[in-house]
Image: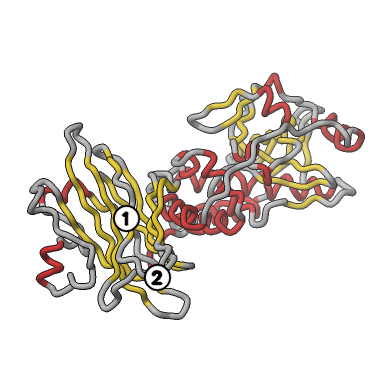
Amino acid sequence: MDYMMAEPQEWWLEISNSIKEQAWSRSQGLATAALPLSLLIYLNELCLNTVLPWLQEGSDTSITTILSQPNSIWALTSGTALEMGDKRLVLLPSEAMDGLEVPQEWVDIPSWLVDYYLAVQVNPDESWVRVWGFTTHAQVKQEGIYDPVARFYTLDQADLDTSLNSFEVTLETCGDAVTQAAIAPLPLLPDIQAQNLLQRLSNPNLAFPRLAIPFSLWGALLENPQWRDRLSQLRQNPAAEQSSATVRPLVNLSQWFQDVAEAGWRSLTDLAAAGQYEGAVAQRDGSAQNPDLVQRCKQVSLDIASGEAKQLRLCLELTPTDDNKVAVRVQLYPMPPDEYLPEGIAVTLLDDDASPLQSAQADVSDAYFIQLRTFRGTSGSQFSLSVTLAEASFIADFVV
């Protein structure tokens, strides 16, 4: 590999034709054909496959990638983490050289914590990469300007150490130097919430999933290797996911007041006419007392561990309020021939970030039904309902 000196303190490496062809093929082969994702993977491929071999050739210390399958990270955010002895660093590629932008993932996810960031300029057209500066996690955390919209920490070029010779000396002689700042832990995500987020964020029309939910949820999702790899797979090949599973529709509740409902959501009158109303002992049709009230139910099937499919009825009752909101009451009933709900079954209300807001559970073996506390939604607000029993689950998404 050729090594050129742009300035005495910089590393300037040539990109081989084989690396360019391989990187281009991988980035353009994405099922999403999403330009931001394709370009992100292309630049990171060029950076890693040019810089890492050169570092390995010139070092007596073992240098390896930290997180498995770096290209799975690139489908979610930019950067590649390397381990050099007892130090960790991240290669951060960019086409420009006007400062350093560090994605928040590399700063505020505890298990992704590193010691150093290397700024790398990549020029695919002229076939070179330039490693031109470095800084520490502590400096980024303490002095970087945080952009809460783009979720980057930024340092100006003047704030970075641009002498890569001093970086080599630092690694060799300053092993005890403080390089990391303290960061807050991230929340633990319930599995049902993580699965809901995975499906939501896998939408190929969502160009930047890292910005679609609060960072605390995004970071917690990426910190789990199984969830991270799953999301990366879905982002890179959503067609495969859609072929193996049905994408959840968004149920529009406001249309129910015009007697328009999605497939499967039936009124109590329809259920009674179809002979499916018996067994729901506590259920009632309240439309006679309140003509503005709308009730619809959907049959839910849960495949429990024994191989048996447990059939249930999820019902929503909607009532317009004086402040232009909609009051929502959620109930869960058994389906005939069962008279009672299975013990341990739960229905949970999730907000639009898949965070649980309230839950109701059948704690006894003779529960006729369970219900959530009535809540109100404004026009356009979204929520989800999950029904869970042991490892089995069902999720439905709604918009008011």
Q: How many marks?
A: 2
**Above or below for 354 versus 386:** above
Q: Quadrant of residue 180?
A: top right
Residue at the image position 66 percent from the left and 46 percent from the top: 80
Q: Residue at x 30, y 63 (%)?
A: 369
CA distance separating discs 1 and 2:
16 Å
Query: Which percent across, then down, holds residue 64?
Result: 76, 52
Dot 2 surroundings within 10 Å: few (below 14), some, or many (20 or more)? few
Q: Are marks 1 and 2 in contact (CB under 8 Å)?
A: no
Residue farthest top in this picture: 158
Measured as percent of width and height from the top left, residue 199 is found at 42, 55
Q: Earlier in the sequence, mark 1 or mark 2?
A: 2
Q: Marks 1 and 2: which is nearer the front?
A: 2
In the rendered image, the vertical position of residue 341 relative to residue 13, given as above or below: below
Q: Nearer the viewer, residue 392 or 47?
A: 392
Instruction: Name the residue type under label 2.
Output: Ser
Label placed on residue 365: 2
Relative to residue 172, is residue 83 drawn left or right? left
Name the image quarter holding the C terminus: top left
Q: Residue furthest right?
A: 173
Give residue 295's quadrant in the image: bottom left
According to the image, label 1 marks what residue? 371
Identified by mark 1, the residue type is Gln
Q: Position of residue 103 (x, y in %)?
A: 59, 36
Asked whether 361 or 44 is in front, the reply is: 361
SS for tag 2?
A: loop
